Image (tube, rainbow, N blue to C red):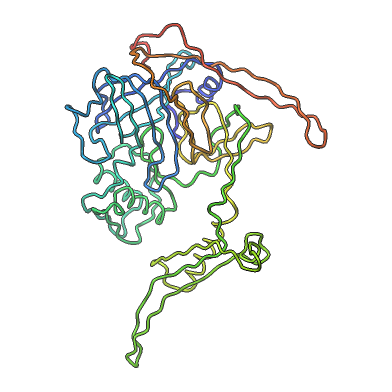
Amino acid sequence: MRSLAWPSKDAYYRRLFGSHDFWLEVDVLDLNEKPVASATLLDGQVDIIASDNGVRRTASLTLIDDQNALDFGVTAAWSGTSLWVNRLVRVQHVIDVDGTDVAATCFVGAPTTIARNGAEVDVSLSDKAILANRGSKPYTVHKGADAVAAVKAIMADCTGEFHFRLPASTGRRLSKDYSVGWDDSASPFAVASRIASKELGWHLLYDASGYLMMRAMPTASVLAIPYVTEPPNTSVDFAGEVNWVQVTGKATTTTNKQHQTIKTQPQAIAQLAASDPLSPSSLARNGVPRYLPLLVSDDSLTSTAQVKASATAALKAGVPAKVTQEYSVIPVFNLDADDIVTLAVSGANPVVRVSTASIPLGVASDMTIGRTVISRKPPRVRSRVQKLRWRQTTKKTKHHWRDKKGKKHTSTSTKHGWKKLPSERSAKDRRV
């Protein structure tokens, strides 16, 4: 989570989690991240997602663009691909903290789809990783180079990135050459991510404010969220269950002294013990085992020990069933993907990783952690050019209940609402 630029973060969170006024500002930027215009937000949401292409943050917005800053018919170039090439959009949530307007940037990214109806624009966006996950002009960082500097060089020289939040050099040197290329599998982001993972044990992502960040997976909570607005929902997914794994490594050909060609290929099989309730024998019908197989072929594995370890790891990853806890909370706008938060849930205080979440930008619902949902209002809102400002209200209700043993318990639920303010300040007054 990015450190916010104001004197007291505690004061900010006290204000955020209490009754407060807020407004949202949407700026249209050029590719050098210079503001070129602003747009009025009618509705929208930001999602934190799990992704295999580097994009961890997406947004869907309904905007009023009466200045045609998002015009893709004449003043902007359409590339013929899914990427709209010459604009970025920045979204900031602003609240008043002790007389100072404090802006938390919750999204910076590029449009991927856009539809216009007069001055009203519906736009879907992805974070800045989308600017770096296609193939690029060949570029190589060489063995022995500083690993952190290599990541920065790839992203700066191949994509033009200049907003970095990278750690200081660790002294780790590249164990081999890494090359960016025209194929998407060798894109700048893919190669930089491989360096971060294999050489440093870290992962690479864009944070909420659009800075490229490299870090180890967080292990400590960065924020205590005092209210959960609904009881947690639990879901179980059995689709990924595996009870039998076969891993095959790289095939090699050798010639012995008798000039005989011998082909070898390491292979290992792992399966759950018969005593496990998900083993093939435990799931048998009429004595016929039921297999839930996973076949893996990996040319990076060259020995029996490696394929055996891979098979064992894959089997463990396949069980148990995936259990997901889903929580609804007051929206928090400056969390980064994979941050850890502590929640106040009937005194249990669970610790949750924000790997998926939905952050509403309108007043439709609360933030959800543990899933992404459609929280924006589905109907099209007709054009309004004024900035809308709202006040969040909080109401607490006590509930008394008994468990199965008859023991009395008391819990508190918090309900939040939104009140439209009767007036709005000028653009000058809204600026920090």
Name the image quarter holding residue 330: top right
Taking the image as shown, residue 227 lies to the left or right of residue 385, namely right
The extreme front residue here reads 286
Q: Nearer the viewer, residue 213 or 131?
A: 131
Image check: 158 left or right of 416? left
Q: Position of residue 364 (x, y in %)?
A: 49, 23
| Left or right of 351 in this view: 121 | left
Q: Residue furthest left?
A: 74
State the quadrant of the C terminus.
top left
Q: At which x and y percent is residue 278?
A: 63, 60
- From what the image shows, is residue 312 above or below residue 5? below
Which residue ends up furthest to the top in the rendered image?
A: 422
Q: Residue at x 39, y 35 (%)?
A: 58
The extreme right residue here reads 406
Residue drawn at x 47%, y 67% as measured from the top left: 247
Q: x and y percent of residue 244 in the render?
A: 55, 65
How many numbered marks does the figure carry? 0
Q: As displayed, is residue 210 above or below residue 91?
A: below
Visible residue check, residue 153: no
Determine the residue positioned at 49% across, 65% down: 310
* Image quadrant where residue 273 sits: bottom right
Instruction: Report the front residue among 217 and 189.
Output: 189
Q: Is residue 408 above or below residue 99?
A: below
User: Would you say residue 39 is visible in this rendering?
Assistant: yes
Foreground pick, 366 / 17: 366
Relative placement, left or right, of 348 versus 408 is: left
Q: Report the residue at 50% width, 22% height from top.
A: 12
Position of residue 45 measured from the top left corner of the image (x, y, whole percent): 43, 29
